[in-house]
Amino acid sequence: MKRYLPVALLALLSAAGCVNASDESAAASSDVTAGDSDTHSVNGSIHVAAGRKSVAAGTVNGNIRIDADANVSSAHTVNGDIHVGAHATVESLHTVNGAITLGAGAQVKESVTSVNGSLDMGDDARVAGAVSSVNGEIVLASARVGGGITTVNGDVKLKGNSHVEGGILVRRAHSTGWFSWEGNGPRIVIGPGASVQGELRFERKVHLYVSDRATIGPVSGATPIPFSGDTPPG
């Protein structure tokens, strides 16, 4: 007997670009190795092998691992991590509850987004569009971002010769009724050799540390705390 996915789940996946009618048979509860065509799953992880070209990978409950030198049109999951290997190329990366890691020299042509997960970019990794996370730490190690960095509750660390165009935005935390708690505020560190082109705008309390060997644009909503050496105090 042919089994069908629940209507609500199909709607969610379809909205995310994960499943269409021809993809239903590919939605499985086991891990999947991507082939030459788009690969989708519901309760399984996806592996895109090294050198694989032009596939899209999507799952709901699972990780996505893209090996070195692969070329993927997009990768998105709801509950899972995404790892992109060295020198791989991806159009866009999106997850809700998971971490995203870009290996050395990896490239993303559009945006990288996570809600509850960290974003780590290795040496010479590049994102042409925006990088954003609501609650996860964002770390660049001599990496480049072309469309700015946005967060609400996550720390931001720019290391090495990292370069960000489009500035940094820390949005105000949403209040619940009459109560709004912002905690101690995110820690923003612009390390030695790093540069930020564009405004650094903070809509909530932050701790902004800027190396005396870093270059930044105008700052609004915070007072930079200068530091020397490799790392700030604390």
Image (spheres, rainbow, N blue to C red):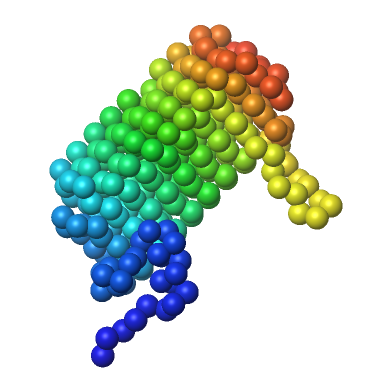
Of residues 109 and 101, which is closer to you in this image? 109
Where residue 233 sits in the image (x, y, percent)?
61, 21
Q: For the point 45% across and 13% down, which residue is it?
A: 193
Of residues 135 and 16, which is closer to you in this image? 16
Write down the quadrant of residue 222 in the picture. top right
In the picture as drawn, the residue positioned furthest to the front comes out as 21
Which quadrant is home to the C terminus?
top right
Q: For the point 56% across and 28% down, which residue is it?
A: 168
Where residue 99 sits in the image (x, y, percent)?
43, 47
Where residue 19 sits in the image (x, y, percent)?
34, 65
User: In this rendering, does residue 62 appear at all?
Assistant: no
Where residue 141 sits in the image (x, y, percent)?
40, 26
User: In this rendering, does residue 218 appear at all?
Assistant: yes
Write down the quadrant of residue 63 in the picture. bottom left
In the picture as drawn, the residue positioned furthest to the right comes out as 178
Judged left or right of residue 9, residue 184 is right
Of residues 217 and 32, which is closer to you in this image? 217
Of residues 226 and 223, which is closer to you in this image? 223
Judged left or right of residue 6, residue 166 is right
In the picture as drawn, the residue positioned furthest to the bottom comes out as 1
Which quadrant is home to the N terminus?
bottom left
